[in-house]
Image: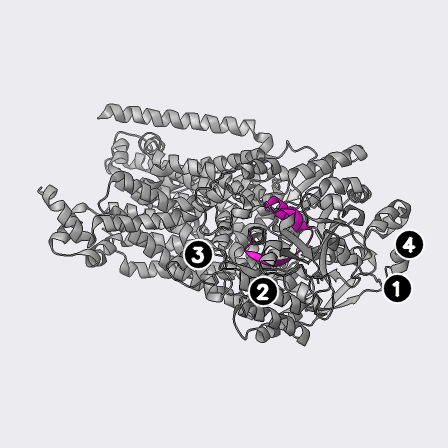
Amino acid sequence: MTTTGTRPARPAARTAPKASGHTATARTRGTRLLAALFLAPTVVGIVVFTVVPILGSVVLSLFQWNVIDSPRWAGAANYREILSDSTVLVSFRNTLVFMVLAVALQLLIALTLAITVNGRMPTWLRSVFRSAFFFPLVLSAASISVVMKYLFNEGFGPVNWLLGTVGVAPVSWLTSQSGAMAAVILTYVWQQFGFSFLLFVGGLNNIPREVHEAASLDGATGLRKHLSITLPLLSPTLLVASVVGIINALQVFEQPYVLTAGGPGDSTRTVVMVIYETAFEQLRFGAASATGVLLFVLIMAVTALQFRLSRRYVHYQ
Amino acid sequence: MSSTVLEPVVSRVRHGLAPWARICGIAVCALLTLGPVIWTVSTSLRTPADSADLPPEIVPTEPSADAYRAVFDKIDIWLYALNSTLVTALIAIGQMITAGLAGYAFARLDFRFKKPLFALVLATMMVPLQVTIVPVFLELKVLGLTDTLLALIIPAFPTAFGTFLMRQYFLGMPKDLGEAAMIDGAGPWRVFRSVYAPLAAPGLAIVGVLAFNYHWNEFFRPLILETSTENLTLPLGLVSLQGNLGTGSISVVLAGVVLSMIPAVAVFVVGQRPLREGITSAGVNR
Amino acid sequence: MTDPLLSRRGLVRYGAYSAGAAALGGVAACWDRLTAADIPGRDDGSLVIATLGSAFDSKARRALRDGFQKAHPGIKLRINAVQAYDWSDFFSKILTQIAAGTAPDVVYVATEGVQLFAQRLGVPFDKWVRRDAAELREYFNDVHPSLVESMMYEGSLYQLPVEFNAADMYLNKNRLGRAGADFPAADWTRDEFTDLLRAMKRTSGDGFIPYFWANRLWGGVVPWLFANGTNILTESKAPGGDWLWRTFYPEARHSRGGGYRWTTPAADSDRVAEVYDYLASLVKDGLCTRPEGGDGRNLVGVFSSGRVGATPAGGFWAGGLHLAGMKPADYDVQYFPRWRTRRHQFGAAGYAVLRTSKKQDEAWEFIKYTIRKDTLAELFAANQTTPARRSMVDAARYRKTGPAHWQIFYDTLDKIPETGPIPAPPQVNEVEQLLIKHTGTALASAGAVRPALRRLQGDLEKAMEREL
């Protein structure tokens, strides 16, 4: 990496315009050496523990392997098989539905609360609220799903009891198709929204106060002001929050696994659950790897799409 | 400025809601957010027979610590806590180092393939653990690390999100500081060591707290990678409390959850400030 | 301005140094912990036993290890509690270990995995059982042949049953009393059961569900299928096994075979549909909730607090309810109600020896140790399962925990000879998953039973064709 010479020492020359040509080259070399050293732990780690395993997975997706016997070449058979398997296809649909609803809800709640908390209130109260909203994030998804399973129980759960006090009929949270998806989404969003919330709080703090005041003096009020002024200024934060949110949502596992075990039927079975079940319960590691490869491609595609869209809609200050 | 007079008016116009209504609304949201946690704590202090009471008795009339005693009785919670602490602390420190260095390189150093390398790092966020766990397992076997705590620690050192955070963090520091040092003849290492690194502590704290948070609660990797009872971490050890065919007492299960929550909450309380500030900076793209 | 900045920097620097030093010190001090070098019996040729973590707590494991060590000082022993949500999780983890070449020698296996292990991984016990027949006679005399047969595969014996649980019906006596109903008779019928549910529903307020069950292989739909004389997979017996029956159960030799075979799916049969229609009608009338998928973790809490009147469970529940604070007088157990037959379902468990083990003879010594009465008495003190030995299911055992009709637990085997194991072919994990999945759909909405069963049938056919 440090063997240079033909390449112009452009960056160094720019950062240190007064340095002589000779020291600039030395500095470039030094910079590159330092960069190599600094990057080594991360890059080596990623190559060994992510890139190579992914390649391994791709290779594995072309074999039939049950762990006990040695792998058998299968070509594209695994892909053909999973693409004609209704459970796999449904799981992709569920995952996309989950992603759209969960991320939208998460961002909406986080943004509303962030704007509200950022309004005038005693400082101590603000920090109490901030801590409260962030708190679920420190809990384990598996444990909290166990708790939520009790809370969402149709006949005896506190959730339906609470709804009952305001006159809502009991909801079949975990045992009807739409109820189960709703329960999984609520559990997930409940735990995750604090992260987007903090992102937004930070983003809002970075919006100069004068902008607000100018807008208010111009007569912009409430919702309209937020739509026309806050949101565009917040768009870089929105991008980060939605990218991270979507990447995480596409990998959802613990909540449906513990709450509904993917049911009723396949209605809350997600792609990662299918990967887990295919590999570790049915011992079809080839088919599981193939599903994993498809999921990886999907995540990449969605993320790329987001960045493309972001070029049009994200405004940097 | 005449803001002292104008402020309440401006505020009302700005939000369209009376402040007290806003505060009440948000307090309800906060209560809903903490509700499940409160229920967990209070149920762990009641007997299982009272666990399903509606409305739930939030403050138990006869609180009982039996469930907590049972946790210490049934599992080697101290050993599991030691394992969890070792794993989580070392991962946190390791991630602070790797993310600090790599984040600095991506933010402040120029080198070839910077963009594709950064994209590669970010792309690892998109890889589900379940996809790579089997090959990782086989690699660890080659390295002779299966069924050791190091098997959990070493693969977790590189962190995509941490690197991203630290890059943002370093980008947020004034560029002139480093340039001034360079004009004074400092090499790239000296610029890092004496100008930027000392300013990085809050950013690193976030990486550390986030790592702690995530890995303290981690279930899937230890589930697959650890075999011996002595190597279990807390979330796995707690599974025993569920009892044969789920017959364990719910109070005991929840007492275990509450106990395992304590360190995470402690770190949260201590690290909340840097965490908040750090996540803040991540959202500001440059 | 520079002063506070400097001191802060200094602070940060020294903070970083001391943190680094502490980390290094910590790593050095805990190096053995990190590399697991401090675990006694690791890589030193110990006999390694894998048990399901939730089945025995750490005290029970220690007792098992210390007891065995005393009996066999020459064999070093390590017990690993493998943590998993349920049996299929547990099996997959063992298989991963086998793949990695770190397999245990002995694995605790329930009915769910008997054939999965026997077919690909297990060592038959036949030669050892023949050799040590005299020593084992006392054990077999004490264990019902149905349990033994459930651990045979194609004529060979792969495990010795240690515990079992049949699905009987638990009833909340307070709810029974409030409904003005007598405790049901031993040969009660399905319709009497339905009437009882109705009576309980009438006399109880909101937040009460007469019948509650978890959607799982053991104790979910299967008890009803068995009561109606059907199954989701056609059941038959493998030939063979005569060597065992002749030696230990001469009176049973004609009715027994070489283990169960579960083959052609029969989920679209009328009998199966009848069962689902019945359960759907219970759901419709508000006599039971739609079943939740999963491990039944909710059950103990809701039953012990009187929010549920009846639920299927086995002997393992006595300990669970006691732990939950239920008094013996508050509940009791009766046989599962009769439909076309009185057949009950059970699941059993015992230790299997892996073919990859290099210490198979030592493993056999361990197996013999685990079936000793004193060993089992220590292990099962808390009534969190039913011992496989008849003589251990006695009044003294259930005095503290209840139920009053504890005899039911073993009589489900003794008095009802057709009682059999849950269907668990080698493809069990997929079968279980499909059953849970389609049961969920079948009962999730009105009119869904038949389409769901047709899909269950189709999916089961695919799963059973798949070579493992």
Gap between marks 4 and 2 measured at Cα:
51 Å
Chain of the residue under the numbered disc 3 shown in the image: A
Q: Position of residue C180 (x, y in %)?
A: 60, 60
Q: Residue type at mark 3: give it.
A: Trp
How many neighbours does mark 4 have within 10 angstroms: few (below 14), some (14-19), or many (20 or more)?
Answer: some
Q: Is residue C20 magenta?
A: no
- Residue C250 position in % (x across, y down): 91, 57
The single residue placed furthest to the left in the displayed view is B2
The chain holding disc 2 is C
Quickly name the residue at label 2.
C199
The residues tagged by marks 3 and 1 sit, at their Cα atoms, a distance apart of: 57 Å
The residue tagged 3 is A161
Helix, strand or loop at disc 2?
A: helix
Can you tell which mark lies on residue C247? 4
* Callout 3–callout 2 Cβ contact below 8 Å: no
Residue A151 disc label: none
Between the residue at mark 3 and the residue at mark 2, the CA separation in whole angstroms equals: 24 Å
From the viewer's perspective, tell me whether residue A103 is left or right of residue C78: left
